[in-house]
Image (cartoon, rainbow, N blue to C red):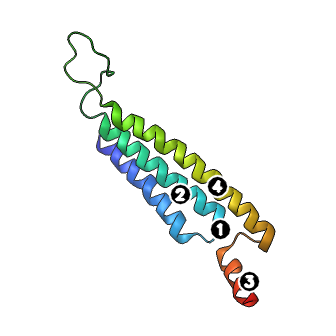
Amino acid sequence: MIIERILIALLFLSGFTAIVGMRNIIRKVFGLNLLNAAVVLLFILEGSRIGNQAPILDEGITTMVDPIPQALMLTAIVIGVCVTALSLALAVRLYRATGSLDIQVITERLQREH
């Protein structure tokens, strides 16, 4: 159980590093996806700690997996896909307008225009 948490933490830190440290917008979007995946995996891991049976009412089952975190994580996955699609569409528009996906280059061009 500890190795899963370590891997999730590494995934989270990789995404955070990509968002903070990279200048390319596409890499920042991928970093955001890594963060989303880490959070989803953490919630699913923690939601399955209680039991390992499906939440179906049957005789003899005393502990079962809580279905609420799984349902919420499906919603989070859908929202993550929508945010990624919107971010990539905005990145394409930004590239067409400025000719670059580098944040520093875009900022310099915007400062020259104003």
Disc 4 versus disc 2: nearer the observer: 4
State the residue at coordinates (58%, 46%). Answer: 81
> Label 3 is placed on what type of residue?
Arg
Secondary structure state at the residue bearing disc 2: helix
27 relative to 65 in the view: left or right: right
| Residue 99 shows in the view | no
Disc 3 versus disc 1: nearer the observer: 3
The disc, 1 or 4, on the residue closer to the chain's N-terminal end is 1
The disc, 4 or 2, on the residue closer to the chain's N-terminal end is 2
State the residue at coordinates (37%, 45%). Answer: 42
| Residue 108 shows in the view | yes
> Label 4 is placed on what type of residue?
Leu
The disc, 3 or 4, on the residue closer to the chain's N-terminal end is 4
Mark 1 and mark 2 residues within 8 Å of each other at the beta carbon:
no
Q: CA distance from mark 3 to mark 2?
A: 25 Å
Q: CA distance from mark 4 to mark 2?
A: 12 Å
Q: CA distance from mark 3 to mark 1?
A: 15 Å
Secondary structure state at the residue bearing disc 4: helix
Secondary structure state at the residue bearing disc 3: helix
Disc 1 versus disc 4: nearer the observer: 4
> Label 1 is placed on what type of residue?
Asn
Which residue matches tag 3?
A: 109
Quadrant into which the C terminus falls: bottom right
Which residue matches tag 2?
A: 32
Which residue matches tag 4?
A: 86
Secondary structure state at the residue bearing disc 1: loop
Which residue matches tag 1?
A: 24
Residue 51, placed above or below residue 29 = above
Badge 4: residue crowd in 10 Å (few <14, some 14–19, many ≥20): few
14 relative to 6 in the view: left or right: right
Mark 4 and mark 2 residues within 8 Å of each other at the beta carbon:
no
